[in-house]
Image (cartoon, rainbow, N blue to C red):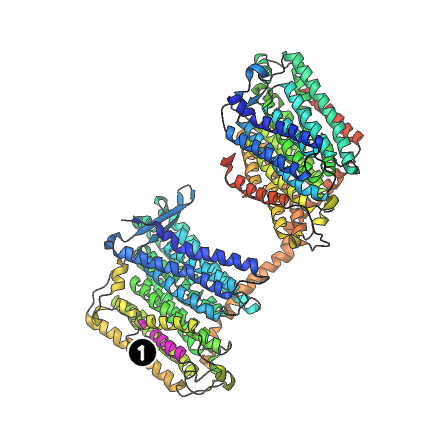
Amino acid sequence: MHDFISLLPLIIIGSGAILLMLFSAFEKIQLETASYISMGFFAAAFLAQLLVGCGPETVLFDKIFNGMLVSSNFTMIAGLIILGCGFFTAMNSHTYFKINLFCTLEFYAIMLFGACGMLLLTLSQELITAFISLEIMSLSIYILVGYDRSNVTSTEAILKYLMLGAFAGAFFTMGTALIYGGTQSTKFAEIGSFVAGHSGTNPLVLGGVFFIFVAFLFKAAAFPFHAWVIDVYDGAAAPVTGFMATALKTAVFTIFANFLAINGALHKDWITFLFYIAVFTMFGGNLIAIGQNSIKRMLAASGIVHSGYLLIALVAISTDNFTGTVVGYYLAAYAVGTLGIFSALSYLAGEGEKRATFDDFRGLANVRPYSAAAITVFLLSMAGIPPTAGFMAKFYVITSAFTAGHMTLAVLGIVSSILSMWYYLRLIIHMYFHEAEECFETGGSPLAAAATFILVFCVFAIGLYPIVI
Amino acid sequence: MEHTATYIGLIPLFPLVGALVLGLMHMLTCTKNPFPEKLYGILACVGPLLSFFLALVVYYHLKGLPAEERFLSHNAFTWFAVGDLQVNMGFLADPLSSLMLLFVTFIGSLIHIYSIGYMAGDKNFGKFFAYLNLFLGSMLILVLGSGPVVMFVGWEGVGLCSYLLISFYSEDTDNVLAGNKAFIVNRIGDLGFVLGMSFLFWAIGTHGFDYLSLKANAHNLTPGIGIAVCLLLFIGACGKSAQIPLYVWLPDAMAGPTPVSALIHAATMVTAGVYMVARFSFLYAHFPLAGSIVAWVGILTALLAAFFGMFQKDIKKILAYSTVSQLGYMFAAVGIAAYSAGIFHVFTHAFFKALLFLGAGSVIYALHHQQDIWKMGGLKDKMPKTYGTMLIGALALSGAPLFSGFFSKDEILFSALASGHTGIWIIGVLVAGMTAYYTFRMIFLVFHGEPRDKEIYDHAKDAPPVMTIPLIILAVGAAFAGVLNLPGIFGGSLNISHWLAPSLVEHHPHVSIWIEILAIVTSIAAFAAGITIAYRKFGHGAEEPEYTGFAKFGYNKFYVDEIYNAVFVQPYKAVGSVISKFLEPNVTDIHVKLCTWLYQKAGKAFKVFQVGYIRVYAIYMVIGLSLMSLFLSQSLK
């Protein structure tokens, strides 16, 4: 029974996706109703996930699934983040698609399918399952990214994402094959015990793990697999970008952490590798971000930097007693901040995302003081200024690096955090210290604005009461 | 023996909530259709009146307890705990703070009511009351705080409100500068307070940093540290309570609205320093040397300010110097360890000085912001209520027998004489005469004689009841508040001194009754002399004299402001301009600018890689993969 309850959020989201798909096949409902329905499913699944609550690590339906799915506190946190992101994205889409008219009913169904894949990915403890859920997630996201078929940038984005994503998928299967060749198993636990049982490096395992890492690093937009992320984030609709940036990253880093944590020896071998990736990701991301003129591109680049921080957390995780709290907290803090900005963009951008560059945000504080204040809060959170969630998250990550003995990494993390001020503060300066050149009325429903201000509250709530996580 | 009483936490909370509500209301509506003034006025008075009511409850609660158990405390929450220093947001109501509470909330409430009339029509009506409520809340935190840290919260809060209210009419640059001056001078004092507090913690604070624990550990202080702590705290008091050498801000502070001058710069905030010294009586009583310094600074301030007061022509400046002078008396009292006498003078002074300021406010209000006493005259027929109440206030201030000021001032002078501080006593008597002189100079010039400016005289009339009723209530207080502490010679039993005894560390010297009579007779003589001279010179009308010689020197306040400006302000500004013009751009900024330039260029260079072709991105992946494989193959060996 406990197994069933643990799977309940996934079941709710899955049935929601099928239901919406049926509705859209027969075109029985309005677009708005579809967004309300998806909000309802996300909310219900979120509550179900909360009610499941903390429990010991459980292998779900061991007999039926043969140990493929494992739930723990960490997966619960990840599930909560993904479902929350889905809920707010549905709210944002409601507003966004009132002005931008390319949406059809299937949008929400596909979003729910995407969430389904993400939830499954967090639970996966087996490589084939992980591959399937990764692909469910990716396929849905591909469609969402390229939803506006008449828009060139959107089409360009889907093309790039799809092609490069295919690479990543190929690497993942290749890695799986190599690992199976080396260890005769695809289950994390058995891979772990194999590594523990054999001293010395098995070249098949080494190569397999490397390819799987490449796939994860690609999805997480880590250096040097980051190049797609800028164009894809820019081309997708604002709510979709928000969803990608937060929920997808959460799912990927959850499985990444779970995979790394299976064995201490495995983790130890890869520390140096991950160390360099983390450093390059942080600094490369910063350098890309400062040159951007579009807000969405800047946020994409800043997402790369945040992946770098998450990699620091992965370097510092303790495999003996893995809880994932630092990673989970960082993901939550990053999710509320980023999603908040994309919520604000959903209603501020206007038709065809007219308000897109730094210059377009000049003097926003005069025209829309509350929105500007909210965006400021999110930016400060992403930059890591107390008392926001982002500060606490960075604080935990850097402390964990210190305690794990990675002094250099911690210091570089702080330096990168200082460098990141450049582009976050730049937007604040544009909003507050410049005169507005032209301002236009924005339409749409108030839902995205509501989401923005709820997320402002979340930024402070998570920041001031870290116990929540 | 302490008792807990949760409700005392509510006393500062009411005005603070009021400030928040009023402030939000004002912020949200200041650009368009503001709320009616009546609503602001009523909301503003609710908090102070509720606090006054609770202050009465505290008083009766304490009264019902045995004398040595009169301590009510409440710990709202642990504010912070760092190492040995654990600071609770705690409140302590004992006889001393309950007396302060009573008159602060009482006079505060009256002045809130008076302000409804005085501020009518001001476009920042709501803001004014938000500040005033915030002030009262901070003052109550200052008074009720259970330890130096909480007191400091209130101390800074009242300083901030004082600054905000002095600069309230911010269209005029002079007012803003006056606010700045008050704030900066106060900060100098605050530095002393903070240092004193730190030393105190360092020396004896590890076993609890509230008054009761400090009092229990005070005997562990070495004389050197103890005297240093006392003097540093006194520097803080000098700033807040306008003593030499930091008194210069108070006369300028009169730029604020008159009710503010009455509440903050006469009755309550400026007496915080005296309250603080009394609060720390367990330290000052241990170290008589520090006490003597306090007393001498106080009495010299009293003398100096009285000199200045004799030559001023702005009605509010006269009252401001008189306030400085009276504060000097209070410090003289607490310096010679006559704490209850000092606090008693704080108490009576609050009534008569608030009354005089509010009366002056009525006059200014009636004369359309004319403050020059040489432009007034003969107003007693036009404004009988204001005249009557101000006369009572003036009599109390000058120490006319049987008025409240007489008893409190006499108590101080008698304590000086009885404890052997003859020098302080002589100067005190002299200042008493000067006080009578400048007070009645003001009364005669404003209300007696012939009108000097016919036009404004014709339009003058008494203020509306919302302003005169508080005047009358304060006048009753100014006349009779002395009864609360009648000395034995008048058949009383020093009620306030006995009431305060559990909070203070003081000894009442037993001296012969002839010394007490001597003290009384000399003060009455000084009062009579002062008033007679004033009457001779100004009683029948006088023309504005051309000041020469010493009088000109006095009128210009001994050029202290100019000296301070030349000695401190200008060199400081010069150093600042050297740093900002030379040191900063050429030495410090240049590195920063170089770093940002490099960073920006690196970003521009990196942007080039973001070409947008998928094939290029795929090549990046391939290059990355190759490098990583190389790295791995290296690590395999």
Q: Residue at x 30, y 62 (%)?
A: B339
| Along the line of sight, the residue nearer the viewer: A438 or B314 | A438
How many marks do you count on the picture? 1
Does B322 sit left or right of A458 as displayed?
A: left
Q: Position of residue A141 (x, y in %)?
A: 70, 31
Helix or strand or loop: what does disc 1 sit on?
A: helix
Residue annotated with mark 1: B526
Does B20 sit left or right of A306 as displayed?
A: left
Q: Residue at x 49, y 35 (%)?
A: A467
Secondary structure mainly formed by the magenta segment:
helix
Indicate the quadrant where residue A115 lies: top right
Q: Is residue A309 visible to the viewer in this orientation of the structure?
A: yes
| Along the line of sight, the residue nearer the viewer: B538 or B32 | B32
Residue bounds of the magenta highlight: B382-405
Q: Residue at x 42, y 54 (%)?
A: B13
User: Does the magenta portion include B390?
Assistant: yes
| Along the line of sight, the residue nearer the viewer: A429 or B280 | A429
User: Does the magenta portion include A437?
Assistant: no
Give above or below for B498 relative to A383.
below
**What chain does badge 1 belong to?**
B
Q: Position of residue B213 (x, y in %)?
A: 32, 48
Q: Position of residue B269 (x, y in %)?
A: 42, 62
Type of the residue with mark 1: Ala
Judged from this view, the residue extending furthest toward the left is: B512
Q: Is residue B146 visible to the viewer in this orientation of the structure?
A: no
Q: Residue at x 40, y 77 (%)?
A: B386
Q: Position of residue B239 (x, y in %)?
A: 44, 62
Q: Dot 1 surroundings within 10 Å: few (below 14), some, or many (20 or more)?
A: many
